[in-house]
Image (tube, rainbow, N blue to C red):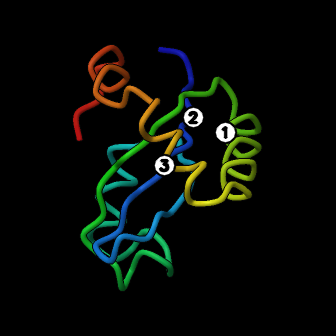
Amino acid sequence: MEDRNYTYILECSDGTLYTGWTNCIEKRLKEHNSGRGSKFTRARVPVKLRYLEISQTKSDAMKREAAIKKLNRAQKEKLILEGHLEKILEENHICI
């Protein structure tokens, strides 16, 4: 199986959006929801996956994370609306 790296946006319990990257989205979501994912999400659980992109390299995923973090909330919400999350999860056999 090819290497996959993911850039993602989570919606936290307080409505804030968190952007990150990982090479295993299932594991990372569990970490976030158990309070071990990041300092930002620790006090804002549970979190819900709202957006996901797949990259071939860690570098590409990290660059995309940095670019998304520079967007304002409206731009992030537009990405989420246009992101086809369910389709990406289904086509890539990702169970969250």
List the residue tagged with mark 3.
77
Q: Do labels 2 and 3 touch, CB within 8 Å?
A: no
Residue 61: image x %, image y %? 67, 39
Residue name at image x 48 percent, y 51 percent? 9
Q: Do labels 1 and 2 touch, CB within 8 Å?
A: yes
Mark 2 lies on a secondary structure that is strand
**Left or right relative to 40: residue 34:** left
Nearest to N terminus: mark 1 or mark 3 = 1
- Of badges 1 and 3, the one in the foreground is 3
Three-letter code, disc 2:
Asn
What is the quadrant of residue 60 in the picture?
top right
Q: CA distance from mark 1 to mark 3?
A: 19 Å
Three-letter code, disc 1:
Ala
List the residue tagged with mark 2.
5
Residue 48: image x %, image y %? 29, 56
Mark 1 lies on a secondary structure that is helix
Q: CA distance from mark 2 to mark 3?
A: 22 Å
Reply above or below: 13 against 73: below
Q: Do labels 1 and 3 touch, CB within 8 Å?
A: no
- Please rate how many residues cluster around mark 3, counting C-alpha atoms within 10 Å: few if below 14, some from 14 to 19, many from 20: some
Nearest to N terminus: mark 2 or mark 3 = 2
Residue 68: image x %, image y %? 66, 49
* Dot label at residue 61: 1
